[in-house]
Image (cartoon, grey):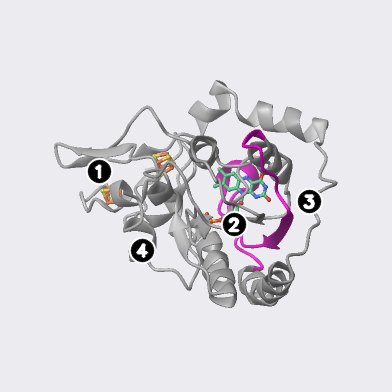
Amino acid sequence: MIIYFSGTGNSLTVAQNIATGLNEKVMHMNEAKKLKTINDRIIGFVFPVHNYDIPPMLKAIIEKLDFPMVKYSFGIITHGGDKGNTMFSLKSLMKDKGSDLHYYSDVLMPVNSRIMYGLLTDKIEERISDSKTKCDAIVNDIKGEKQNAQKIRKNHLIAVMHNLADTNFLKKRFTPVVDTDLCTNCGICQSVCPVNNISVIKGKAFIGDSCEQCTTCMHWCPQVAIHYGKRKVRKEQQYHNPEIKLKDISKRNL
Ligand SMILES: Cc1cc2nc3c(=O)[nH]c(=O)nc-3n(C[C@H](O)[C@H](O)[C@H](O)COP(=O)(O)O)c2cc1C
Ligand code: SF4
Ligand code: SF4
């Protein structure tokens, strides 16, 4: 079983490619959230790096799950160039469950973060093309039950940077706001928010208090009505993986 999270589709394409190669199934983290245990022998996690670490919403879900039958586990991250302490955190989570992380790898992908990188739009085609070759190599590694996660160490400087990015000051700064003049009440942002933090009130989208600054709503809004305070987002700054459609993201946020 491969459990995944994906805001703009990069991790979903990687999860699907790996699942196809392994003849495994993919499960969105919000489906896994409904379970207590996953009884598979092989468990994989595919997700984006957020602020040098695991997205908090996924971390919270893994913390509550048990994997009593797991014999081999792997983590594959998609990212824009800074892997941070993500794999250390995933390994720690698995160890807390009396298990371990056996294999990890990463796939460099187009960046979807305004917070860290300012929505770079270059290298999209090149990175997506290279990612397919990388997925093939990962599938071969996993088929051979390769183990490379023994020596993962925490980088303490990166942990400081993660904690800085996680402060309320910065979080508030990068919590999206809806331009109600542009909002047409289509409900798309509500359907893609992975933590159900968006409601529609009096015909306009409203961002609640549980935002995890994942930027998903901002990327998928067809009216480009979701901004960051005074920072306006432009159409060309929105991104989603070209192989992934809106329905692939929205239908899985349960
Ligand atoms: C809130 C946020 C934080 C991010 N932080 C990092 C980071 O620390 N390092 C990095 O390389 N990429 C970072 N990224 C970029 C994503 O990891 C990358 O674009 C990923 O492939 C997106 O996957 P998705 O399309 O499945 O959501 C961040 C993206 C977001 C939205
Ligand atoms: S996706 Fe954009 S236009 Fe649609 S409801 Fe949300 S903010 Fe309004
Ligand atoms: S409101 Fe937008 S940025 Fe915040 S968690 Fe939901 S989708 Fe992500």
Residue in view at x 59 percent, y 76 percent? 21
Dot 1 corresponds to which residue? 181
Question: In the figure, is residue 5 to the left or right of 186?
Answer: right
Residue 165 higher or lower than 35, as above or below: above
Mark 4 or 3: the one toward you: 3
Question: Would you identify the image quadrant in which residue 36 lies?
Answer: top left
Instruction: Report the residue marked by disc 4.
Output: 246
Check disc 3 and give the amino acid type.
Answer: Ala
What amino acid type is highlighted by mark number 2? Gly
Ligand 3's quadrant is: top left
Front in this rendered view, residue 176 or 73: 73
What type is the residue that disc 4 sits on? Leu
- The residue segment tinted magenta is 96-123
Is 101 on the left-hand or right-hand side of 63? right
236, above or below 56, in the image? below
**Kind of residue at disc 1:** Asp
Count how many numbered circles sit on residues in the image: 4
Magenta region, main secondary structure: loop
Q: Secondary structure at mark 4?
A: helix
Q: Going by the image, does 30 lie left or right of 180?
A: right
Residue 237 image position (x, y, % from top left): 51, 57
Real-space CA distance between mark 4 and mark 1, rounded to the nearest whole angstrom: 23 Å
Q: Which residue is mark 3?
A: 149
Residue furthest to the front in view is 69
Label located before the other in sequence (1 or 2): 2
Q: CA distance from mark 4 to mark 3?
A: 34 Å
Q: CA distance from mark 1 to mark 2?
A: 43 Å
- The answer to whether 110 is drawn above or below residue 144 in the figure is above
Query: Upstream in the sequence, badge 4 or badge 1?
Result: 1
Judge depth for marks 1 and 2 and give the one in front. 2
Q: Within 8 Å of ligand 1, the CB of disc 3?
A: no
